[in-house]
Image: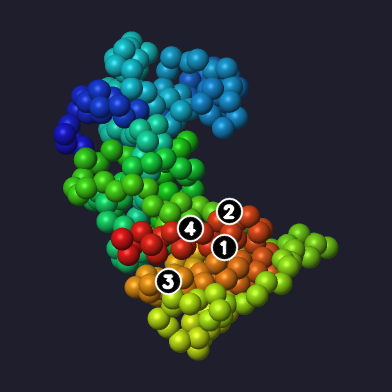
Amino acid sequence: MSATSEPLNVALALAAAGVPVLPLRAGKVPFGNCRTCKGNACGGRPNMKAAGPCRCPAPCHAWAAATTDPHTLTSPVWAPVWREAVAVAYHPGGAGLTVVDLDNAAAVAWARESLPATRIVPTTRGEHWLYRGAMPSANAVRPGIDVKSLMQYARWLGPGAGRMAVLPAAVRALVVKEDTTPAPGEVASSLPTRAPWGRSVATGCRHTERYVRTGLERGLALVRSRTESGAGSQAFGVARFLAAQHTACPGPCGLAAIGEEIVTVAVSVGVPEAYARRAVANGFEAAMERAA
């Protein structure tokens, strides 16, 4: 199926495969709302974040209008829109997919180094990496990188090539929300002091204590330096890197103790504890996935 085929034919083929679709106008953006829905006066569709009662038969509300129903796609209300359409978009989350939108060469290079291989669709400036599984969407998770899944649309540019992988923890971690700037008058929460990493909890580690401690301290310094923003993402990266050093060890290696130290430092610069723990756990999981 070609991305340059007649938009309606492309849309019908995708819909038949279970992919919710919508038309794009010049500029490759969704069509505007009808008069009734303009300014969201209708209250929005039931599937939107702020669920509303709108049942408009027109392709209003961008991604929320995406459908797999061929009768809707070929209805008289949609007919004039298809005559003006220049491309087709789809709702990745509605198809159980996540698209990592890499907008430039630097972003592509980062993905090749950091994410599991999967199906790739070339774009004008970069690539779309498709994974099986849906998740919250977020823009600018890294320079030149958007995550498109639930409540978002992506332009259909063809099926791509490569085997589609299951959505990895490394992608989920990109949208971990964090607050690394405590509100005025507030003090970042602290955690109870726990025993640091040591040989007593790492009886199966093949590394020396000095090696592990040096790497950990360098990683903690990176997290500690993110006083304005990015500490949660940095905690994920540090956890992933440190765990990767132990994938060849017979174990146990005391990763839980290492994780506690990363969490403590992340919390000290304002990351909510729940987010810090999630970032560290995802980092450890990502390291194991890459080693598998």
Nearer mark to the viewer, of 3 and 2: 3
Question: Residue shown at 31%/60% (left/top)?
Answer: 292
Sequence order check: which comes first, mark 4 or mark 3?
3
User: How far across and how far down the image is residue 107, in percent?
Assistant: 35, 62
- Kindly indicate the quadrant of the structure image that contains residue 50: top right
Nearer mark to the viewer, of 4 and 1: 4
Instruction: Identify the disc placed on residue 282.
Output: 4
On the question of residue 191 being in view, the answer is yes
The residue beneath circle 3 is 251
> Horizontal placement of 52 versus 286: left or right?
right
Q: Mark 4 is on which residue type?
A: Asn
User: How far across and how far down the image is residue 179, in percent?
Assistant: 65, 58
Sequence order check: which comes first, mark 3 or mark 2?
2
Instruction: Identify the disc placed on residue 177.
Output: 2
Q: Element at badge 2? A: loop
112 up-or-down from 75: above or below: below
Residue farthest to the bottom, as pictured: 210
User: How far across and how far down the image is residue 24, in percent?
Assistant: 34, 32
Question: Residue shown at 50%/76% (left/top)?
Answer: 202
User: How far across and how far down the image is residue 93, in percent?
Assistant: 41, 36
Q: CA distance from mark 1 to mark 3?
A: 27 Å
Name the one closer to the observer, 152 or 175: 175
Q: CA distance from mark 4 to mark 1?
A: 11 Å
> Horizontal placement of 13 versus 109: left or right?
left
The residue beneath circle 1 is 232
Nearer mark to the viewer, of 1 and 3: 3
Label 4 CA crowd tier, 10 Å (few <14, some 14–19, many 20+): many
The reply to whether the C-beta atoms of the residues labelled 1 and 2 are less than 8 Å apart is: yes
Q: CA distance from mark 4 to mark 2?
A: 13 Å
